[in-house]
């Protein structure tokens, strides 16, 4: 996929640089920092060459520098793939930052392929290297730590049984149509298009009032479930009938095989949706959260309830974040399900100790992380100020006096800063809603936002001494 590590600067690039075209200070500081971190490039190179028999031959692709820098730029500016490609191609300074210079900038699909070659483990390792580099430069001492959890949404519509059944019918029908076209047919014999009747019943259910639902929804749901079952059975029968289609060229065979695999995948998800709707609506059963499916497009989506008044239910994944006093996100993790917050305290202390060599002097969080065991564990490991408010129960006089003390209140003011960091990640780095597909790309999306945040903070911290000197002068 890539070979050349260093790009040769052309005469045109040198001339533009000589005329005074320079990167903006933030990007220049990030560029200088990345130039010094050769280990980051090697991490990316391993992913780009993974699975290639001979990485030194074949068509030239994006270099590790171009992939990493373009990914960072994309998340700093919160652009999509098309805008990223167009902006880099349109501006010399962005070409300079992303290491393209006068070379042709590929289309958005090339950036997409390059980014998806990366793994979540690689980006986590890169983030760890970035944090360690900041520690080695003396930009962060790790004396304070604040933690919190948030929810990053998956790119799905609000799930109801009727809309999920409608999704199954329309998607399977569309894929069967594509399979017929790939086989050179107008339609596949025996498969009946039921999208129209399914859409009508879905819309009928959506428009029902609360009173109408009590008397009418069961019969309508029974009809919609029957349509979905008929479509799935017909699709599987169509797969069996077309299993021994005539000989075709290898490319067509691959395309047909992928379509068949995709149809089987959505038929399997459709079985889960039908079973879920039948149990919930027809049988009145309470389906456990772990057995539910909230989207056939993002089946890994979790339902999260955090007791928030404005958003009582959220669909996505819970993400744990730990931030230092200088604004670096030293730890992050995309969680499975909806675990309680209090289980992260001991683990986060151990990770902090691995990075900084010791536990923080101040550990601050909201009341969701409180337990007597967590407070005791923090004190035993050497945390001087354990700033975790008690959750529920009657407070002892000693505990009440401690939570009214100056150091505890200062710790809670410090804790509030992570709310602002989460807001910046959501609004500025595009982490509020993941537009990528699949669990692995979801984790990549979160990791890229965290990496962009850390590089921006390091660039700002590196610029602080020079700005102070300018003010003094």
Image (spheres, rainbow, N blue to C red):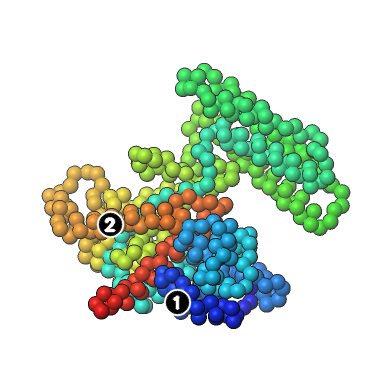
Crowd around label 1: few <14 · some 14–19 · many ≥20 (10 Å)? few
Looking at the picture, how far across and down is residue 332, in whole percent?
A: 41, 60
Q: Is residue 215 visible?
A: yes
Mark closest to the chain's N terminus, 1 or 2: 1
Helix, strand or loop under label 2: helix
Crowd around label 2: few <14 · some 14–19 · many ≥20 (10 Å)? many
Q: Is residue 383 left or right of residue 125?
A: left
Asked whether disc 1 touches disc 2, contact meaning CB atoms under 8 Å apart, the reply is no
Q: Quadrant of residue 3?
A: bottom right
Helix, strand or loop under label 1: helix
Q: Is residue 19 left or right of residue 392?
A: right
Residue that appears at 52% across and 34% down: 160
Q: Nearer the viewer, residue 97 or 430?
A: 97
Q: Where 428 sits versus 209, above or below?
A: below
In the image, which disc is placed on residue 220?
none
In the image, which disc is placed on residue 32?
1
Q: Nearer the viewer, residue 23 or 194?
A: 23
Q: Is residue 354 left or right of residue 179?
A: left
Residue that appears at 36% across and 74% down: 462
Looking at the picture, how far across and down is residue 312, in whole percent?
A: 39, 39
**How far is disc 1 from disc 2 in space, using C-alphas?**
31 Å
Q: Quadrant of residue 10?
A: bottom right
Q: Which residue is mark 2?
A: 415
State which quarter of the image contains the N terminus.
bottom right
Q: Is residue 7 left or right of residue 458?
A: right
State which quarter of the image contains the C terminus.
bottom left
Q: Is residue 130 visible?
A: no
Looking at the picture, how far across and down is residue 391, in whole percent?
A: 26, 47
């Amino acid at each position: 996929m890539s070979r050349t590590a260093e790009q040769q600067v052309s005469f045109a690039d040198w001339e533009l640089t000589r005329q005074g075209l320079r990167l903006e200070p933030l990007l220049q500081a990030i560029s200088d920092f990345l130039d010094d971190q050769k280990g980051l490039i090697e991490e990316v190179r391993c992913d780009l060459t993974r699975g290639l028999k001979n990485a030194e031959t074949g068509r030239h692709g994006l270099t590790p520098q171009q992939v990493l820098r373009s990914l960072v730029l994309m998340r700093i500016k919160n652009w999509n793939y098309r805008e990223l490609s167009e902006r880099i191609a349109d501006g010399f300074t962005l070409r300079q930052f992303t290491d393209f210079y006068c070379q042709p900038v590929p289309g958005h699909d090339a950036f997409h392929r390059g980014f998806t070659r990366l793994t979540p483990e690689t980006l986590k390792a890169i983030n760890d290297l970035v944090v360690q580099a900041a520690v080695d430069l003396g930009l962060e001492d790790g004396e304070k730590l604040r933690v919190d959890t948030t929810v990053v949404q998956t790119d799905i519509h609000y799930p109801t049984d009727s809309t999920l059944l409608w999704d199954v019918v329309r998607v399977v029908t569309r894929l069967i149509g594509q399979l017929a076209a790939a086989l050179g047919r107008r339609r596949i014999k025996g498969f009946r298009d039921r999208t129209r009747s399914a859409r009508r019943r879905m819309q009928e259910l959506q428009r029902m009032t609360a009173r109408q639902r009590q008397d009418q929804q069961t019969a309508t749901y029974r009809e919609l479930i029957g349509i979905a079952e008929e479509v799935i059975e017909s699709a599987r029968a169509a797969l069996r009938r077309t299993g021994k289609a005539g000989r075709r060229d290898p490319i067509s065979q691959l395309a047909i095989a992928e379509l068949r695999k995709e149809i089987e995948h959505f038929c399997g998800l459709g079985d889960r949706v039908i079973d879920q709707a039948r149990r919930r609506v027809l049988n009145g059963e309470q389906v456990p959260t772990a057995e539910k499916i909230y989207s056939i497009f993002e089946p890994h989506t979790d339902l999260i309830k955090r007791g928030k008044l404005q958003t009582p239910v959220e669909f996505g994944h819970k993400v744990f974040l730990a931030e230092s006093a200088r604004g670096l996100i030293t730890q992050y993790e995309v969680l499975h399900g909806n675990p309680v917050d209090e289980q992260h305290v001991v683990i986060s202390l151990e990770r902090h100790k691995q990075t900084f060599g010791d536990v923080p002097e101040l550990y601050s969080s909201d009341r969701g992380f409180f337990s007597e065991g967590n407070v005791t564990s923090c004190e035993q490991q050497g945390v001087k100020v354990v700033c975790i408010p008690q959750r529920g129960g009657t407070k002892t006089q000693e505990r009440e006096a401690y939570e009214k003390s100056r150091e505890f209140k200062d710790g809670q003011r410090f804790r509030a800063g992570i709310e602002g960091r989460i807001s910046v990640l959501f609004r500025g780095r595009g982490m509020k809603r993941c537009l990528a597909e699949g669990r692995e790309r979801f984790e990549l999306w979160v990791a890229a936002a965290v990496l962009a945040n850390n590089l921006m903070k390091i660039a700002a911290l590196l610029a602080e001494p020079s700005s102070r000197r300018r003010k003094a002068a």
